Image: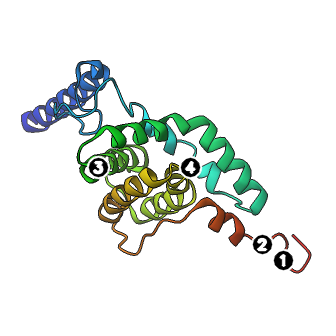
Amino acid sequence: MKRRLSTALEMCYTVTAYVHIRMTDGFGMSICRGDRSVPEWRDGMLQGIEAVFADRVRMMTSLKKKTYKDFSAEFEEKYGNYFSEMREYVEQAEDKKAAADEIGECIMQAVTNTCANKRGKLDARSRSEASLFMVYYVFPAILKLGDTGTVIADGVLAACRAGLKNRSLQYVEYDTIYNGFNEKIFGLF
């Protein structure tokens, strides 16, 4: 019984330390690595990136050409600031690939925090939903950043392939996805 109580207290302390670091992010603490205090992102960059994945279920249901266009516009309007911060961070960095890899790790941590089950792991369904959401919304938003967007997308793709256990994951531009939807099937829908 003592061992269980001790383990529960340790878990409570870890969660408290995690929340404390998240709250004191303005002092240069890492916002991506949980309770590790590694100074990476300055000035709270990408703080709250988990919000990007909050509406994933609503945005993935009943995808048709019109709803995808509306959801994409809404997504870029609500969360466009995160993608502009990513671009600025990579453009200012000396090693652009390393900066893009850091962004990829941060996004995968946000996916894990948002989509994980009670044990803190991604099950098969959550991984597939996250993969589709990344392909439909996150990667097209990143690729709209131009040449810097391609560098960021490569870093995020590498992290997603490892974190989501999907080696065949690819990214594609918004226009390709949008044009892939049919207007009507047999004139009915």
On the image, which quarter does residue 106 sit in? top left
Q: CA distance from mark 1 to mark 2?
A: 7 Å
Residue linked to disc 3: 96
For marks 4 and 1, the one nearer the N-term is 4
For marks 2 and 4, the one nearer the N-term is 4
Q: Is residue 43 above or below residue 63?
A: above
Residue linked to disc 2: 182
Residue type indicated by callout 2: Asn
Residue linked to disc 4: 56
Q: CA distance from mark 4 to mark 1?
A: 26 Å
Label 2 packing within 10 angstroms: few (<14), some (14-19), many (20+): few
For marks 1 and 3, the one nearer the N-term is 3
Relative placement, left or right, of 99 versus 6 is right
On the image, which quarter does residue 15 sit in? top left
Q: Secondary structure at mark 4?
A: helix
Residue linked to disc 1: 185
Q: Is residue 178 above or below residue 47?
A: below
Q: Secondary structure at mark 2?
A: loop
Residue type indicated by callout 3: Lys
Q: Residue at x 31, y 58 (%)?
A: 159
Q: Secondary structure at mark 3?
A: helix
Q: CA distance from mark 3 to mark 2?
A: 38 Å
Q: Residue at x 28, y 25 (%)?
A: 19
Q: Nearer the viewer, residue 128 or 143?
A: 143
For marks 3 and 4, the one nearer the N-term is 4
Q: CA distance from mark 1 to mark 3?
A: 44 Å
| Image coordinates for residue 77, horizontal then vertical, percent | 63, 37
Q: Are marks 1 and 2 in contact (CB under 8 Å)?
A: yes
User: Which residue extends farthest bottom?
Assistant: 186
Residue type indicated by callout 1: Ile
Q: Residue at x 36, y 42 (%)?
A: 91
